[in-house]
């Protein structure tokens, strides 16, 4: 499934990719506002 999705993504236009990147940045900013001081801390197995 991931190979199919990767192929689809590679064939998307620059405009579509730019829109997804813009939305990701928007979500990143909102997350920083909603969770100030958050820092990812993975747990060691």
Image (cartoon, rainbow, N blue to C red):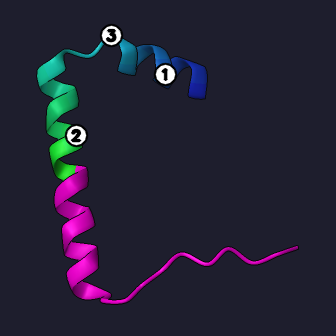
Instruction: Pick out the residue farthest to the top.
Output: 11
Residue 20 image label = 2
Rendering coords of residue 44 (x, y %)? 82, 75
> Would you identify the image quadrant in which residue 12 lies?
top left
Q: Are marks 1 and 2 in contact (CB under 8 Å)?
A: no
Seen in the picture, residue 20 relative to 16 is either above or below; the reply is below
In the shown orientation, is residue 36 left or right of residue 23? right
What is the quadrant of residue 38 in the picture? bottom left
Whether the magenta-drawn stretch holds residue 30 is answered as yes
- Using the image, determine if residue 45 lies above or below residue 5: below
Could you tell me which secondary element the residue under label 2 belongs to?
A: helix
Q: Which residue is label 1 attached to?
A: 6
Q: Residue furthest right?
A: 45
For this rendering, which residue is in front, 2 or 43? 43
Q: Locate residue 25, reporting x and y percent.
A: 21, 55
Q: Which residues are magenta?
A: 24-45
Along the line of sight, which residue is nearer the eye, 14 or 1?
14
- Dot 1 or dot 3: first in sequence order is 1
**Image vertical order of residue 10 relative to residue 22, above or below:** above
Q: Residues within 10 Å of mark 2 (few under 14, many from 20)?
A: few
Q: Which mark is residue 11?
A: 3
């Amino acid at each position: 499934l991931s190979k199919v999705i990767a192929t689809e993504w590679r064939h998307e236009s620059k405009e579509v990719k730019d829109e997804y990147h813009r939305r990701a940045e928007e979500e990143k900013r909102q997350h920083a506002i909603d969770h100030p001081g958050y820092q990812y801390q993975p747990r060691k197995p």
